[in-house]
Amino acid sequence: MTSRGSTGKGPAGRRKGKKLPGRPRQVAPTSATVLSTATGARLDLVGGADRDTSVQGVTLRAQDVQPGDLFAALPGAATHGARFADQAVAAGATAILTDPAGRVELSRVLPPETAVAVLIHPAPRTVLGTVSARVYGNPSQRLKLIGITGTSGKTTTSYLVEAALLAAGHSVGLIGTVETRVNGVAQPSSLTTPEAPTLQALLAAMLEDGVDVVVMEVSSHALSLGRVDGAHFAIGAFTNLSQDHLDFHGTMRAYFDAKAQLFVPSSPTHAVRAVVCVDDEWGRRMADLARRPGEAAHLQPVTVSTGATPAHWHAGPSDLVGDGTSHTPFTEPDGDHVLVIPLPGRYNVANGLLAVAVAHAAGVPISTALDAVASVSVPGRLQRVDRGQPFLALVDYAHKPGAVEAVLATLRGQLGEGPGRVAIVIGAGGDRDAGKRPLMGEAAARGAELVIVTDDNPRSEEPAAIRSEVLAGARAVDATERPVAAEPIREVGDRAAAIAAAIAWAGPGDIVLVAGKGHEAGQEINGVKHPFDDRDVVARALESSTPQSAPAGSVAAEGDR
Ligand SMILES: CC(=O)N[C@H]1[C@@H](OP(=O)(O)OP(=O)(O)OC[C@H]2O[C@@H](n3ccc(=O)[nH]c3=O)[C@H](O)[C@@H]2O)O[C@H](CO)[C@@H](O)[C@@H]1O[C@H](C)C(=O)N[C@@H](C)C(=O)N[C@H](CCC(=O)O)C(=O)O
Ligand SMILES: Nc1ncnc2c1ncn2[C@@H]1O[C@H](COP(=O)(O)OP(=O)(O)OP(=O)(O)O)[C@@H](O)[C@H]1O
């Protein structure tokens, strides 16, 4: 499996052993006074600190501070950053950005005689993006920044856009859920969208490395928490919206409003150009909101559709070729083309068409983009694991109801009228939107003959309680609404055992889908990340299961790892 599909180079295309530069080598100093003026924060010169105190970096986590940094001591859900200010100052922080409560905390934790410039703002998170962008020289104004948002399809679409940009000769940076990558050097990501200090430092480092275009995933958390404040997006793309993250946003409307900040012209983080998939109602609303009455045509949103909704870019019916490659004719304002994409499912046609439209908006010729997306793979998204077994074993990142529904519909379509059946191994993450758990169970029961409910990342929650919520949704589905050969829903808490049970169940022509963790390399239980990679576990289960004879047309070893 290539961890990037873009160039077809695969792991060999990576510069092994090289570390991604997280920060630029050169940063011009910014004075505390300039930052105070730019943000309206009150400047308090503790211990006689100089008002010209210079800042050459910004850090959110005290333990990561480097000499010359401003430490952003923010209030959080678990603690207040100001409690760690002594560590930040000991590491060389010259300035601190905090709120009034944090200022009080500083008096308690900082050693006497500490000289440090303190910027006090009632809501420091709201100015952190501006501060970070300013300190790192506003890097997004000197490169082309493309932001991709939506509930599902962000990672896939960004890989496809990256492939198109690389094919057109750009030097490309990628920031997203799976990894952050610059010129072939990659490192795993911890957040989908980094916090503002990390993001701005990364953009500045990319610029130094010669990058001219950056494709990044923009999560709704990032938009709500100001992580992309201070970033100037040349293009913003919207994939779709379905239920997720309601623990954080409360309602679908608030979730949508968070995403809309990338598109609504009145929002400070709106992209210059919007490219919007209008397949769902939310997308249609987003395209309306992104319109700019009275402005030039080239600034109006570009719409993309794979369904009945008319759009600038419109896909016709797809022909499935081989094991998942689809050929889809489409029209765009200047002509007709065919999108060939090696990722199965109509939803991937939507991702593919959106990606080509985004690349085109970034100046890539359509033919170049189409050639590039025809050979892309994305880690942990319908990734095959093959040990010569007579059925298809797939690892996928579906961990929300809409994604489970979309991927199962695709797999059932792939089975066609044949006798094959689908097994899904599924769980739900702890400490995240609990409302989606029964809905995921329901989608699984509707689309698979065998449903094995297991643990995902329980995090701090009781795993059995999470499973019971998924099970409740699955078991509530009436037998008449399940596939004809459906079996009773099973519960196997241990994820490896659940995977082994699904593999043991499968016979020739069946499909086993291990959903939810995709590319992830660990399972988080009670604050500890245990090594666990679904792809390795599936491979081991296949190797230790009884060998069966391969039927005609069994899958090739592509996507294996
Ligand atoms: C809801 C959310 O996003 N919370 C983020 C937020 O936490 P918080 O403000 O509550 O921080 P806290 O833990 O109370 O700590 C307060 C402050 O003390 C500092 N601190 C804390 C402890 C310490 O030892 N040293 C230290 O300096 C922290 O850096 C922080 O500034 O600030 C923290 C510091 O950056 C983040 O790690 C944390 O993300 C948590 C880990 C998280 O899991 N976020 C997820 C939900 C998220 O953002 N996901 C999105 C969407 C993904 C998707 O679409 O599926 C993403 O973009 O990844
Ligand atoms: N356009 C789409 N519509 C519905 N489901 C999709 C779409 N694209 C991908 N999926 C499903 O969602 C899963 C995650 O896809 P991808 O990583 O591209 O999305 P994402 O938006 O980055 O997800 P996340 O926010 O969870 O990181 C896939 O494994 C697949 O099951």
Image (cartoon, rainbow, N blue to C red):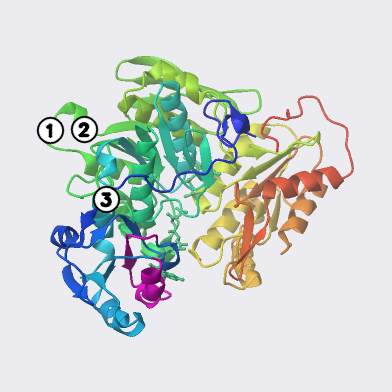
- Whole-Å distance between the Cαs marked 2 and 3? 27 Å
Q: Which residue is mark 3?
A: 133
Mark 2 or mark 3, which has the lower sequence index?
A: 3
Q: Amino acid at mark 3?
A: Ala
Could you say which is closer to the camera, residue 539 or residue 107?
A: 107
Which of the 4 image quarters holds residue 147?
Answer: top left
Helix, strand or loop under label 3:
helix
Q: Amino acid at mark 1?
A: Glu
Does the beta carbon at disc 2 come under 8 Å from ligand 2?
no
Q: Residue furthest left?
A: 294
Q: Position of residue 84 (x, y in %)?
A: 40, 74
Residue in view at x 64 percent, y 38 percent: 383
Helix, strand or loop under label 2:
loop
Q: Position of residue 446 (x, y in %)?
A: 61, 50
Could you say which is closer to the camera, residue 180 or residue 82?
A: 82
Residue in view at x 27 percent, y 50 percent: 133
Q: Which residue is mark 2?
A: 300
Instruction: Classify 373 as above or below 406.
Output: above
* Res. 203 visible in picture: yes
Residue in view at x 37 percent, y 27 percent: 359
Q: Which residue is mark 1?
A: 295
Q: Residues within 10 Å of mark 1 (few under 14, many from 20)?
A: few
Residue in view at x 56 percent, y 56 percent: 440
Asked whether the residues under the numbered discs 1 and 2 touch, taking CB atoms below 8 Å apart as contact, a structural biologist would say yes
Q: Which mark is residue 108?
A: none
Could you say which is closer to the camera, residue 300 or residue 360?
A: 360
Mark 1 or mark 2, which has the lower sequence index?
A: 1
User: Is-magenta flag for residue 84?
Assistant: yes
Q: Nearer the viewer, mark 2 or mark 3?
A: 3
